[in-house]
Image (cartoon, helix red, strand yellow):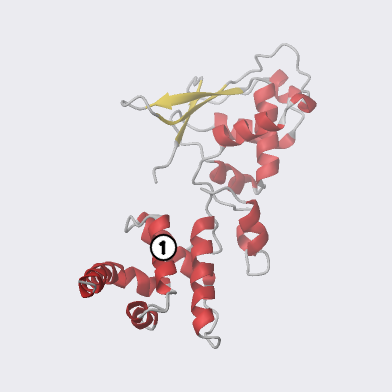
Amino acid sequence: MSENINKLEKFDSGYDVFNRNTIQAIENPISLAIWVYLLSKPNDWIVREADIRKHFNIGRDRYLKAMRYLRDLELYEVNRIKGNDGKFIGNRIIVYPTIRKTDYTVNHTDITEKEIITEKEIITDRESVVTDTAPTISEKNIDEIISNIDEEEYIRPSKKIKFKKRHYLLALKMYKDLKAFNEGIKKPNLFKWANDFRLMEEEDNREYKKMYNFLEFLSKPDEFWTFWRGVILSPSNMRKKYDTVSTQFKAYLTAEKNKQY
């Protein structure tokens, strides 16, 4: 899945000078910090929500509130970028060195839920990381995180592991299906399993629906799947044997069909 590109554009004079009146008008300290931070970056710098949040050690809500504040002061705007095929490929974030709005009063009560959602879609890098929750992700809070996270947002329990909601749900399904046939099965590291399902999707180009159907077949009691259920005991095994099992299953179905004639 390709990443949306959010490129920075600013009015660059070759050195950074900040307007005194603008600085004094920005009452939100996080907004002020982000505005200065963006102005200090070069043109065409790739703007990522995750990078900004990590730099200032803030969560998503504080980040979005700060960006809405800057938007209301007209200190930045977003223009969509089209590729050669006419499709949108990202955004150009334009940051201004001075407030263009004559009335400095910012009224956040005017912002509707629809506008908030739109702001998330525009500002959020779709490959963003839940950096404010990542250090404390565990089995105790993963269900709450899964229920509140966007479909295309990554969860990172550690530096080497990342996955999306659907990958974790596949891992959980596989564990529950295996446990239905073997109560004594040891509970695996579901985060690692979810990461393996991500690799199957992103590196092996396996579709979610086909992986789900594979697990459904794996839980069937017929002879063919009973054998493979004793072999495929983890997503990493499934990844290695996927093509082999798919080929043999097609041959098995053909053979079973021929028995009927």
Determine whether, in the image, residue 134 is placed left or right of residue 1.
Answer: right
Q: Which residue of the protein is positioned furthest toward the bottom in this rendering? A: 184
- Quadrant assignment, res 242: bottom left
Q: Is residue 91 above or below residue 184?
A: above
Determine whether, in the image, residue 175 is placed left or right of residue 227.
Answer: right
Which residue is rendered at x = 57% and y = 23% of the image? Answer: 77
Q: In the image, residue 176 lies at what x, y percent?
A: 54, 74
Q: Nearer the viewer, residue 33 or 150?
A: 150
- Quadrant assignment, res 145: bottom right
Q: In the image, residue 222 lies at what x, y percent?
A: 37, 79
**Which quadrant is home to the C terminus?**
bottom left
Q: In the image, residue 117 lies at what x, y percent?
A: 63, 35
Q: Nearer the viewer, residue 187 or 64?
A: 187
Amino acid of disc 1:
Asn
Q: Nearer the viewer, residue 213 or 27?
A: 213
Which residue is rendered at x = 34% and y = 68% of the image? Answer: 239
Determine whether, in the image, residue 7 is placed left or right of residue 241.
Answer: right
Q: Is residue 134 above or below residue 222?
A: above
Which residue is rendered at x = 65% and y = 14% of the image? Answer: 100
Does residue 74 appear in the picture of this structure?
yes
Determine whether, in the image, residue 219 is placed left or right of residue 66.
Answer: left
- Quadrant assignment, res 198: bottom left
Q: Which residue of the protein is positioned furthest toward the front in this rendering? A: 261
Q: Which residue of the protein is positioned furthest toward the top in this rendering? A: 102
Mark 1 burial class by Cα count in 10 Å: few <14, some 14-19, many 20+: few
Q: Which residue is mark 1?
A: 213
Q: Secondary structure at mark 1?
A: helix
Q: Is residue 220 above or below residue 133?
A: below
